Amino acid sequence: MTPFSSLLIATAILVAYGLFSMRLQSAIHPIRVRVAHEIETWIALENVPDDVKRDLDEMGKHLFSKWAAWVIVISFLPIVAKSVVSKLIGIKNPSWSHPRKPAILHTFAQGVLCTIASSPICLLIFVVEFFLSVLVASPIRLARIVVHTTSQLMLVNQLRRN
């Protein structure tokens, strides 16, 4: 491979990355605007907990941040691992209740995806991490179901014997 062909390939990759990045930003922009509006709506409600409002406000500040995208991508697998381990050993995560909690969590999820989409490389890494976490978490979840079912059957058998 000649230096000219290497330079040509590198230039083609950079141009393709730039075009993909521009296309991704234009595709994700309407979603970002909607998420920003939803965040403002949730923050304006009086019955949403203050810590949730602070989290939503932080999410809104970082919807366009490439730095925040890298923080999310780097911290995703450790957070998933902590969640899986805490479920395995039976630690309950603190939770808040609100009649619209699913909708608020949906806004969080869309905000995270909008932030990650700030960088196409981050988006690619996140997709790979997400599928890896699903591949790892699914057998663990299945194992928990099997262990729980087995322990329930053992308890039923023990009760029948008595």
Image (cartoon, rainbow, N blue to C red):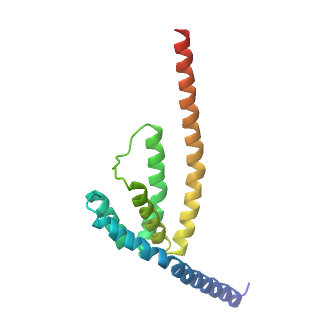
- Which residue is located at x 29 percent, y 58 percent? 48
* Residue at the extreme top: 162
Depicted 73 relative to depicted 20: above or below: above
User: Could you tell me residue 113's position as x and y percent?
Assistant: 48, 67
- The image quadrant that residue 140 belongs to is top right
Q: Is residue 162 left or right of residue 90?
A: right
Task: State the residue in front, 67 or 106.
Answer: 106
- Against 69, residue 98 (above or below) is above
Residue found at the far bottom of this picture:
4
Q: Is residue 4 visible?
A: yes
* Residue 127 or residue 154, whichever sits in front: 154
Image coords of residue 150 (percent x, y): 57, 27
Q: Quadrant of residue 35?
A: bottom left
Give the camera-side residue of 147 and 128.
147
Asked if residue 17 lies left or right of residue 52, the reply is right
Is 83 above or below relative to 156? below
